[in-house]
Amino acid sequence: MANHPGSSRSLPNTSPGLSYWQRTTRAFPSLLANRHVAVPRVAKYVVIGSGISGALTAFELLEAGVYGEDVIILEAREAASGASSRNAGHVRPDAFRGFTAYAKVHGEEQALKIIANERLVLEKVDEFTRKHNVPCDFSLTTTFDVCMTPEFAAYAAESLDAYKKAGGDTSHVKCHQGEEAQAKTRVPGAVAAYEWPAGSSHPAKLAQFLLKAAIDKGAKLFTFCPATKIKKNEAGELWDIHTPRGVMTTEKIIHCTNAHAALLLPRLESYIQPNRAQAHTLIPTPAFAAENALTNTFSLRYSLHHFYSLIQRGGDGTLVLGVSRSNPTLSAETLAGRFSTDDTHYNDEIAQDALRNFGQIFPDYKAEDAMHGEGLEHAWTGIIAMTTDSVPFVGAIDSLPGQYICAGFNGHGMARIFTCAPGVVRLVLGGSWSDTGLPECFQFSTDRLSKLTDGSVSSVW
Ligand SMILES: Cc1cc2nc3c(=O)[nH]c(=O)nc-3n(C[C@H](O)[C@H](O)[C@H](O)COP(=O)(O)OP(=O)(O)OC[C@H]3O[C@@H](n4cnc5c(N)ncnc54)[C@H](O)[C@@H]3O)c2cc1C
C-alpha cells in the first residue's frame, strides 16, 4: 500500500484529536466495535467508511431489504471518526449564492438542480429525524447569511438576481437590508442579511444512530480496520479487500471514504483534495445565555472565501464556531497548512482569529468580562474532501464493476448526504441513475474525469 499523507491517497491519521461531538459521545457502545476481531472471509456488501455517508448507506441497504448479516462496514479508526464527527453542526442548504459559480462549471440547469437538491436534503433530514426519533439534537430553524461588507452584499444580490432569472425558487428566502438586517441578526456591522430555512444537529449522534440501527439489524462494523488494498479475486469475478485483520471477498463495495477515497481508487488522487478545517466551541457569556441564546444559525461573510459559521445548541447552549478554510488575514504558513490530512491538533492562529472576529461581529458578547468557565472551551480539526468540480462523486465506478462511490462532499456533506447515500443504494440494488433523483453532474463516470483532465471544467471555489 502506498500511503501519501496530505493527499486523498492516504489512510486517516492514526492519532486524531477529539472534537466536541466526540467528547460528548464517548459511551457509544459501538465506538470500538470488533476492534480486535478478524473480518469474515466473505461478505456480500462492504461499505468502507463509517461517517454519515457510510452509516446511511448501510442503513438504507437494510431498509431496502438487504439482510443485515450481508453488510459489513469497515472503519479505519473509531466509529464515525472522520469529518462527520468533526464538523460545525450546520445542516445548511445553499439557497441561491452558489448558483453563478455552479452554472459556470456545470451549466444553469445543473446549478438549479444542485441548489434544489440541498433544499431537499434539509427536508429529508428533518423528516428522517422525526420519523425515527433520532436523538441527534436536530433543530429546524432559519439561517442568516450575513453580508459583512458592501462588496459581499453586492455579490450576494447579483447571485440572487441571476438565480431568479434562471427560474430558481426564492419564495423561502427573505432579504433584510441595513438597520433591519442589524436588528434581526444582532450584528451591528451587517450590511445586509438573507434568511432561509436551515438546521443544526449533533453530527456524531446522527452517525452513531445510523450505525446502531444497522448493527441492530445484523450488520457488522469493524473499527480500527482500514481497507488497505482491493484486488480482483483469483477467479476474476469478485473483489478481495485486504485489511490488517484478514482478506474479505465480496461482490459489492461502496466507497464512503471521502477525503481518503484515492487510497483505494488511486485514479481519484487529482480529483479529490483533502483540506483541513477547524471548529471551536464557546461557552456563552450572559449576552448569549438563557433568553439571549441564538435561535437561528449564521454564516458571517466578509467574502466568498472568508467567513465564519455559527450555531448555538439548545440545552447546553454551546456555541459552535466554524471558520472558512481560506482567510486572507492568516499567515502564509497557516494557510498552507490546510492542505493536510492531519487532524491531530488545532491551529492557534486560526482559533485566535475566530475569537477576535466573533467578538467584533457580536460586540455584546463581551469576552473581556467572561467568568472562569465561559469563553473558548475546545477547538479541533477535521478533513474535508474538495472535488475539482465542487460536487460529489456518486454512483457506479464504471471501470470496476461491483464498486460504487459516495464521496467528495466539499465541506457540505450534512446538506448533501441524505440524498446521495440513498441514491447510491438504489444504484447498488440495480436501479438506474434517474431513480436517484440526483443532479446528473453528481454521477461518477470516466467521462466526467476526462473532462476534468482536459480542463474543460474547473473548480467553483
Ligand atoms: C471542521 C469541519 C466543519 C464542517 N462543517 C460542516 C457543516 O457545518 N455543515 C456541513 O454540511 N458539512 C460540514 N463539514 C463537512 C462534513 O462534515 C462532511 O461533508 C461529511 O461529514 C462527510 O461525511 P462522509 O461520511 O462522506 O465522510 P467522513 O465523515 O470523513 O467519513 C469517512 C470515513 O471513512 C473512513 N476511512 C477512510 N479511508 C478508509 C479506509 N481505507 N478504510 C476504512 N475506513 C476508511 C474515515 O476514517 C472516516 O470515518 C465540515 C467538516 C469539517 C472538518
Image (cartoon, grey):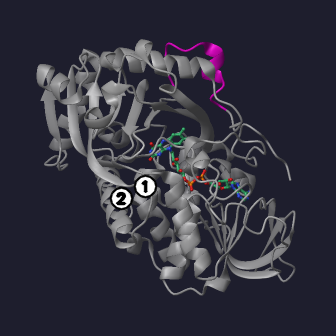
Q: Position of residue 68 (x, y in %)?
A: 61, 83
Front residue of 288 and 15: 288
Q: Residue at x 39, y 43 (%)?
A: 313
- Say whether residue 395 is visible: no
Q: Residue at x 52, y 43 (%)?
A: 87
Label pair 1/2, CB-CB below 8 angstroms: yes
**Residue type of the residue flagged with mark 2:** Val
User: Which residues fall within the magenta stretch?
Assistant: 326-339
Res. 143 image quadrant: top left
**Residue type of the residue flagged with mark 1:** Arg
Which numbered disc covers residue 343?
Answer: none
Q: Is mark 1 within 8 Å of ligand 1?
A: yes
Front residue of 313 and 127: 313
Quick one: quadrant of the C terminus? Answer: top left
Classify mark 1: residues with Cα within 10 Å, few (<14), some (14-19) or many (20+): many
Q: What secondary structure do most residues of the magenta stretch adopt?
A: loop
Magenta stretch encompasses residue 334 = yes
Which numbered disc covers residue 121?
Answer: 2
Alpha carbon separation for disc pair 1 and 2? 6 Å
